[in-house]
Amino acid sequence: MKMNKTLAILAWGMIGLLGAAALAVIAVHRGEPINALWLVTAATCCFALGYRFYSRFIAAKILSLDSLRATPAERMENGRDFLVTNKWVVFGHHFAAIAGPGPLVGPVLAAQFGYLPGTMWVLAGGVFAGCVQDFVILLFSVRRDGKSLTEMAKDEIGVIGGFVAYVAVIAILIILLGVAALIVVNALKASPWGTFTIAMTMPIALLMGVYLRRIRPGKVLEVSALGFVLVLAAIWGGQYISQSATLARLFTFSAPTLAILIMVYGFAASAVPVWLLLAPRDYLSTFVKLGTIALLGVGIVALHPTLHMPALTRFVDGSGPVFAGKIFPFAFITIACGAISGFHALIASGTTPKLIARETETRMVGYGAMMCESAVAVMAVVAACVMQPGIYFAINSPAGIVGQAPAAASATISGWGFPVTAADMQALAHAVGEQTLFNRTGGAPAFAVGMASIFSHSLGGETLMALWYHFALMFEALFILTVLDAGTRVARFMVQDALGHVYEPLGRTSWYPSILGTSAVIVGAWGYFLWQGVKDPLGGINSLWPLFGISNQLLATVALCVATTIIIKMHRARYAVVTLAPLAWLVAVTFTASWQKMFDSNPRVGFLAQARVLAAGPVNGATARLIFNNRLDAVVTGLLVLMVTLVLVESLRQWMGILSGTREARVKESPFVRTRLAEEQG
Amino acid sequence: MRQIISGWRTFMDALREIFDEAAYARFLNRAGVASSNEAYAAFRQELEKTNGRRPKCC
C-alpha cells in the first residue's frame, strides 16, 4: 500500500516536472521554430494534473459528491430524456454536444499574436475556468432535477438573474449564428469545389434519410458510415467541377449570394419539418466531426510538425490584421470555447444531467469532457502555427487592410516581417485547388490549409493536399450548418415560449403562423449580423467575432455567478475562490473588451470611433449602413454588459446578505433520496 | 483481453447513444413493437420533440 503511494507520488512528480519543462520551453523559447510536441506534452501534463488534483479537490471539498444520492436519471427515469446511462456513454454524448467549430476557429484567429498567448490561455483557462464551470453547473443541475441554467439563475439569484440569463442565451444564439454563417460564407465564396461538396451533402443526406426510413430503420451508424463514404466521393469529384469552366461557374458564388442562400436554408430548417434532410445530416456531421478530431489528434502526435509562427508576433500591440486589439483582453474573448464557454453551461444544464447515474460521475463528464475540448483547441493552435506566418496572414487578412491585389497584399505582409510572395500564394492556392487564398478571413480556410499541410507530409503527400484541404473545409462547413439549423430552432422555441405568455397561440410550437413568424424573426436577426459581416470592408470577423466572444463569456459570467451563489449558500464560502477567481477574470476581460469595443478611439477597435470616421467622410448609402451597423454593435455590446452588471449586483447582494447573516442561505436542491443503484451493484 | 472487449463495447455503446440507435431500441422496447418503417417514423416524431430544444455548442 505504502509502496503504491510512493510510486504514485513519484509518477505525478515526474508528470509535474515534465509539464513544467514543456511549459518553460513554450514560454521562453525564442527565435528558432519549435516542435508541436512541446505543446502536446505541456497540454497532456497540465490536463492530467488538473484532473487528478484540482477537480478532485473541488469534488471532495466543495461539492461533496455523494455516490449514495439518487440522481434525476434514476428518480425520474422515463426511458426518454431521463435515463440512467453508462458514464463513458454520457461522456461521449456530452463531448459530442459541446465540441463545435469554436475551439477550432478561435485559436486560429488568436494565432495572430503568436502561438504562446493562445496556448497559455487554453491551458490555464481550461483547467481553472472552463472545466470548473462545466463541472459545477452539471452537478448543480443534477441536484436540481436537471434544471436549466436560466431556471437555476432564477431560483438561486432571483428573477433578474433568470431574465438576464434568458436574454443572454437568445442574444448569444443570434450573434453566434450570424458569425458561424459568416465563417461558412468566407470559406465557400468563389470556391466551386467547396460549394459543390457542401451542396452534395443535401442529396446524400436525403438518401440517408430514405435508407433510414425505408430500408434499414434506425441503423444510424451504418448509414452514417455509408454517407461518409459518399461525402468522400463528393470531395474527390469536386476537383473535376473546379477544373471544368462550365461546371465551376454553376458552383461559384459571391459572398452576398451565399449569405442569402444560407438564410433561406436556416429559415427552411426552422420552419419546415424536414427531418429527412436535417437529421441524417446531423448524424453525418457528428460522424465526420468525431472522426476528424481523432484523426487530427493522432496526426499531430504521430507527425509532430514544426511550428513556424513565432511565440509572440508584433501584433501583441493591438495592430493585428485579423482583428484589432491588444492581447488583453482580446486573446481571451477570441478563444472562448477552448478555454471557457458560457454556452457549455447550457449543455451541462440541458440533456447531460438527465443521463448521469451517480453524482460522482459529474467530475469525469463535466470536467473531463471540457478538458478534451481544450485539447482540441491546442490542436487548432498547432494547425494554425504550422503554416509560414506570411501565408497565415495572407489568408486571414481582409482586403481592407492588406489590399485586394496579390502583389500589394504580399508586399504589405512582407513589410510586417512575415515574408510571402504572390507566387507562393498562387502555388499554394493551386495545390489546394482554389483560385486564390488571399483574404479568406474567418479562420476556417486557414485551419483547412494547416490541417492539409500536416497530413500532406505523410498520408498521400502533396498530391492529396487539395483533398485534405477540401475535407477540412467540408468538415467545418457541414458542422456549422448543423449548428445553424439546430440553433435557429432552439432560439425559435425560446421566443415562442416567451410570446406564449403574451398571446397563448403564439406559444404553440405546432401553430404555423407562430412558427413562420418566429422563424423569420430569428433568421432575420442573425441574418442581419451575417449581412453586416459580408458587407464589412474589414471582413466582418474583425467586429463580429469579438462581439460573439464577449456575449459567450458574459454568459459564462452569469453561469459562474450562479455557481458562486450556490457554493456560498452551501456554507463553502471559504472555497468560493474556485469559481470567484475565473468570474473575476471574466468580468475584467469582458468588461474591458466591451468598453474598448464601444469607446476606443482607434476606429479599427471601437465601434463608435469607426462610425465617427465614416461619418466624417463622404456619406453614401453604403457608408450610412456601415455607420448604423457600428452604432448598433455598440448598443448591443452595451446592453449585454448592462444586463450582466445587473446579475453581478444581484449576486453580490445575495452573497453579502448570506455572509452577514441577514439573508437565509437556502439552496433549492431536490430532497435527498438514497440511490438503489448502489445496492444493485453491491 | 477482457478489458479490450469491454472497452470496445463501451465505445460502441457511446456511439449508439450519440447516434440515437440506443434511444430507438428503448423506444421499441417501451412501445413493445418490432422495428419497422412505421415504428421508426413514430420514434423520429417523439425524438423531434425533445431534440428540437437541444442546443449545439459553438
Image: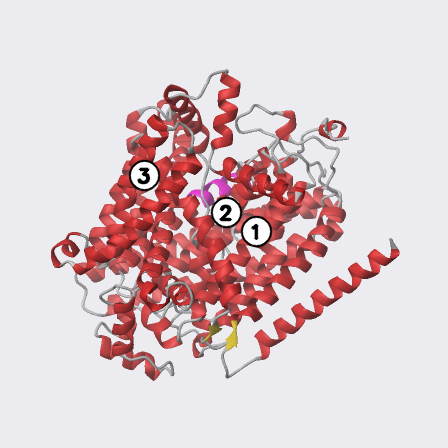
Q: Secondary structure at mark 3?
A: helix
Could one spot residue A332 in this view of the protein?
no
Instruction: Specify the subunit that label 3 lies on.
Output: A
Relative height, residue A589 to residue A198 (above, below): below
The stretch drawn in magenta includes residue A77? no
Which circle marks residue A370 in the picture? 1
Quarter containing the C terminus of chain A: top right
Q: CA distance from mark 2 to mark 1?
A: 8 Å
The answer to whether the residues at label 2 and label 1 have Cβ atoms under 8 Å apart is yes
Q: Residue at x 38, y 46 (%)?
A: A174
Magenta stretch, overall SS: helix
Which of these two is toward me, A597 or A418? A418
Q: Which amino acid, by three-letter code, is at mark 3?
A: Ala
Q: Quadrant of residue A244?
A: bottom left
The answer to whether the residues at label 3 and label 1 have Cβ atoms under 8 Å apart is no
Q: Which residues are magenta?
A: A161-170
Q: Position of residue A102 (x, y in %)?
A: 44, 54
Instruction: Specify the subunit that label 1 lies on.
Output: A
Instruction: Specify the subunit that label 2 lies on.
Output: A
Q: Position of residue A208 (x, y in %)?
A: 33, 36
Could one spot residue A42 in this view of the protein?
yes
- Residue occupying the far front of the picture: B1
Q: Which amino acid, by three-letter code, is at mark 2?
A: Ile
Q: Is residue A678 rendered to the left or right of residue B16?
A: right
Which circle marks residue A205 in the picture? 3
Q: Secondary structure at mark 1?
A: helix
